[in-house]
Amino acid sequence: PDGSPLHQYSMGGMAEYSVLPAFAAYRMPKEVVDMGTDTAIVGCALFTAYGAVKNAAQIQPGMRVAVFGAGGVGMNVMQICRAFGAAEVIAVDLDRSKLDFAKSCMGATQIVDARASADVVAEVKSHTPFGRGVDVAFEVVGSPVTFDQAVSAVGDGGKAVMVGLTKLGTRGSVDITRMVRRKITVQGSFGAKARSDTPVILDMLKRGVLSLESISKRYTLDQAADAFEDLEAGKIMGKAVVEF
């Protein structure tokens, strides 16, 4: 009210209002507006997944991919890979119920239960021709263990795309000689290109190419703390929405 400039860093989660530049606001098509509060995940889960698939991995029809982590972002990486024509989408997670959901609803063609598997990387490779490995592996957990598995699951000339975040200072390791000789690329991916990618994501939702099926729970604003506790405890399959 006094004319002082307002600033905000990154996102406005749980906020009634948010300060953002005009070019960051997009009018949603009526078909998407009619999807209601579920569209809240467009600006994060879908946006992050789309950037990883299109801009970092540059998925092409016929590619074989593995997704380490069947959470909210990981599941959307799967469905976007399928939308881009991936021939095989291998989901890897410790939670069997999340894997089953990923296969039945989110585009996974094969699943690897990391808790039950004797060798996760070998099992992933067993789903590829001659066991050579995937063209692209997405790490969507933010763990040194899955970082190494993702790089190891990639075949010659392939790419490991790192999407998961964790504590600053956490380090992952790779087999240097294998990476060099096999010409493997390790690339980070954070978000997407808002100006060019957001309209495409909204159009894909409008046309039914993408879905919002990764949402499994809804909370009221008064239950927001419960939502974070459930998230920390791994009780949320896919994404959850706080409605107010």
Image: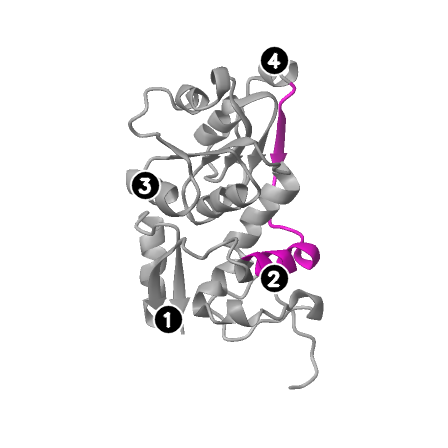
Image side of residue 204 versus residue 212, left or right? right
Query: Which residue is labeled 3 in the image?
Result: 100
Q: Which comes sooner in the sequence, label 4 or label 1?
A: 4
Q: Secondary structure at mark 3?
A: helix
What residue is shown with label 2? 9
Pick the residue in front: 161 or 100: 100
Front of the two marks 1 and 3:
3
Q: Residues within 10 Å of mark 1 (few under 14, many from 20)?
A: some
Q: Which mark is residue 63?
A: none
Q: Which residues are magenta?
A: 183-204
Q: Residue at image x 44%, y 28%?
A: 145
Judging by the rendered image, the residue that carries numbered circle 4 is 177
Mark 4 or mark 2, whichever is nearer to me = 4
Magenta residue check for 55: no
Q: Choose mark 4 or mark 3, whichever is in front.
A: 3
Q: Is residue 130 left or right of residue 183?
A: left
Residue type at the position of mark 3: Asp
Numbered disc 1: secondary structure: helix
Residue 240 quadrant: bottom left
C-alpha separation, residue under disc 4 versus residue under disc 1: 51 Å
Instruction: Give me the residue at 37% from left, 41% from top.
Output: 103
Eyeballing the image, is 183 above or below 209?
above
Location of residue 209 in the rendering, given as x and y in whole percent from the top left corner: 52, 53
| Residue 17 vertical position relative to residue 86 in the rendered view, above or below | below
| Mark 3 surroundings: few (<14), some (14-19) or many (≥20) residues within 10 A | some
Q: Earlier in the sequence, mark 4 or mark 3?
A: 3
Q: Amino acid at mark 4?
A: Thr
Q: Earlier in the sequence, mark 1 or mark 2?
A: 2
Quadrant in which residue 207 is drawn: bottom right
